[in-house]
Image (cartoon, helix red, strand yellow):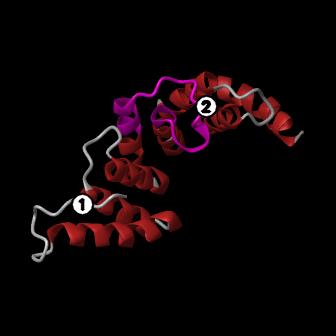
Amino acid sequence: MITRLLLKEWKPLAEWGNSKAQYWLGVLYGHGKGVHKNYKEAAKWYKLATEQDNLDAQSSLGLLYWGWSCFSPCQRVPMDYQESIKWSKLAAEQGHGYAQNALGTMFMSGYGVPADFVIAHMWFNISAANGKKLATQLAPQLAGKITFLVTPQKGWGAKTPAL
């Protein structure tokens, strides 16, 4: 009921170019709140909001293209790792904590980018510094894996541990 009221209020604002309303319409469509779940419609509203430098929309668009978060596994927008990295990195470099955490996960898993534990650790630390709790848990775990890979006892030829 409330989401339908929000939709009624936000849609005219979004059509007039309000980036916050555009972002929140993307959220409603992406989650199927008050409307039928429609990822293409979510992407449309996120893209409009990104044109006005809305960091939440940039981060959400990055996740949408990656097929992550509330958008998977029922992905309706083609996965596009390059677009995902582009939008996630843009938001992360401007201080968006969730985008920073997402980049850490992307580099840790090697989806869309070459797996790189050091860069992943960096993004998790930056995200943790911005108050994202999941990153505060992932950064130390990843640090242990980095140490394992380069210890003198194991050498550089050590087998990469499974994540």
Residue at 53 percent across and 24 percent down: it is: 77
Of badges 1 and 2, nearer the viewer stands 2
> Is residue 126 rendered magenta in the image?
no
Q: Which mark is residue 74?
A: 2
Q: Which quadrant is the N terminus positioned in?
A: top right
Q: Is residue 89 above or below residue 120?
A: above
Left or right placement of residue 122 versus residue 3 in this view: left
Number of dots carrying numbers: 2
Query: In the rendered image, which residue does mark 1 sit on?
Result: 118
Residue 141: x %, y % from top left? 38, 70
Residue 16 shows in the view: no
Q: Is residue 152 above or below residue 64?
A: below
Region rendered in magenta: 64-87
Amino acid type at image mark 1: Val
Q: Is residue 94 above or below residue 52?
A: below
Q: Which mark is residue 50?
A: none
Label 1 element class: helix
> Is residue 84 rendered magenta in the image?
yes
Label 2 element class: loop
Residue at 81 percent across and 39 percent down: it is: 3
